[in-house]
Image (cartoon, rainbow, N blue to C red):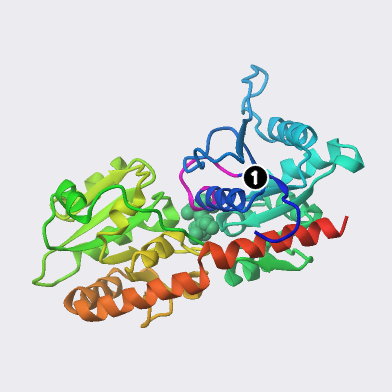
Amino acid sequence: MDSKPPLKIGITCYPSVGGSGILACALGEELAARGHDIHFISYGKPFRLPVNSPRVFFHPVVINDYGLFKYPDYTLPLSVKMAEVTRDFGLDVLHVHYAVPHATAAILARSMLPLAQQPRVVATLHGTDTTLLGRDKGYGPAISHALACSDAVTTVSEDLKRETERLLHVEKPIDVIHNFFKPGKPARSKEEVRKELGLTDETIILHSSNLRPVKRIDLLLQAVARITTKKRFSLVILAGDDFGPWNEEMWKLGLSDRVIIREKVIDVEDYLQVADIGLYTSDSESFCLSILEGMCFGSPSVATRVGGIPEVVESGVSGLLVEAGDPDVLARAVEQLIENPSQCRTMGEAAKIRAANLFSPEVIVPQYEKLYRRVLANR
Ligand code: GMT
């Protein structure tokens, strides 16, 4: 921890499975371990909320379903809870992850409080809040306004910073703070996990995501269907959402014996430790935390060269990046790694070193602490 007095920080994120919630929880846990008090404010307990941490608190936002409202409103009850927690616990900073509606609610919460109690607002953009909602005429102006009113704005990659400046016309300087991952200890041995998956010595390709359209699960399945090698391999999908809608496609492609699905997995480390290769086929990705998770366990990924991914993976060194949208090109890259296990291992080792050097909590968390101190100094 830095030598200055500990801070009181409110963190708001989506509690559902998604990169921004995972990052927010990991950040909260690391900040608490460094002595800060962390107050999570959200409609549900984030699925990776640190447990048994004496300095981590959770404040639920209760949403009433009034008959008059066709669509239940979350922004106002969230802003009221943010103001209440800030006042009751003397929060210094409200750090919101994902702009919509969290940044708007934080700005509103701040304006509900007397000057002396007003927190600093830090907004971290994670990807689709800029690349998808930022383009939406019904959201864009509100996001731009909330960012303009925030005390600091961060993005998880240089690419997302450029996209945010381009789409949302943010004039204030944006700080780039990359994502980090701290691998936990797997709960089971590699042998136990392979046994549970029904696998022996085949190469394991891993894909871990929330299956949203941007992840291109169609392309993932097509690419795997086009891999030609005499070696045995399987695709393990850690699905953050129901895989059901993809079953038919999987059957049609003749992949039902090759693909193993595990839904809403908490102990990702169990599976990360047995993966040989990651496979990510997204059309757009601000960072791709899942690639980093694999890197921490020494597995290189084949991925599309989009968004912030080239900041995470050095193609040819710590993984292989290919043009987006072509299942054949993806299949050839995966084949290259399956056919050359020693090249695959060398890339995996390079990936692990890169993750530790650039994207570890020791490197990243102090950057957030420095940012909090900076915005507080401007009081
Ligand atoms: O993965 C998603 O679509 C959800 C989204 C989120 O905010 O939860 O993920 C984004 O944030 C992650 C954490 O910063 C990044 O690693 C992902 O690349 C990013 N997803 C996209 O940009 C599509």
Residue 14 magenta-drawn?
Answer: yes
Q: Is residue 136 left or right of residue 52?
A: right
Q: Residue at x 13, y 63 (%)?
A: 202
Q: How many marks?
A: 1
Q: Residue at x 43, y 79 (%)?
A: 314
Reply above or below: 348 against 364: below
Q: Residue at x 29, y 68 (%)?
A: 327
- Under mark 1, the amino acid is Ile
Most extreme residue toward the left is 230
Q: Is residue 238 visible?
A: yes
Q: Is residue 224 left or right of residue 83?
A: left
- The part of the chain drawn in magenta is 13-21
Most extreme residue toward the front is 3
**Image x and y of residue 23, in percent:** 53, 53
Q: Main secondary structure of the magenta part?
A: loop
Most extreme residue toward the right is 115
Q: Is residue 348 left or right of residue 372?
A: left
Residue 330 magenta-drawn?
Answer: no
Q: Residues within 10 Å of mark 1 (few under 14, many from 20)?
A: many
* Position of the N terminus by quadrant: bottom right
**Image x and y of residue 128, in percent:** 56, 55
The residue labelled by disc 1 is 11
Q: Is residue 282 visible?
A: no
SS type, badge 1:
strand
**Camera-nearest residue between 245 and 348:** 348
**Camera-nearest residue between 110 and 200:** 200
* Position of the C terminus by quadrant: bottom right
Q: Is residue 348 left or right of residue 193?
A: right
Q: Residue at x 79, y 65 (%)?
A: 172
Q: Quadrant of residue 324?
A: bottom left
**Image x and y of residue 300, in percent:** 33, 71
**Image x and y of residue 123, in percent:** 69, 54
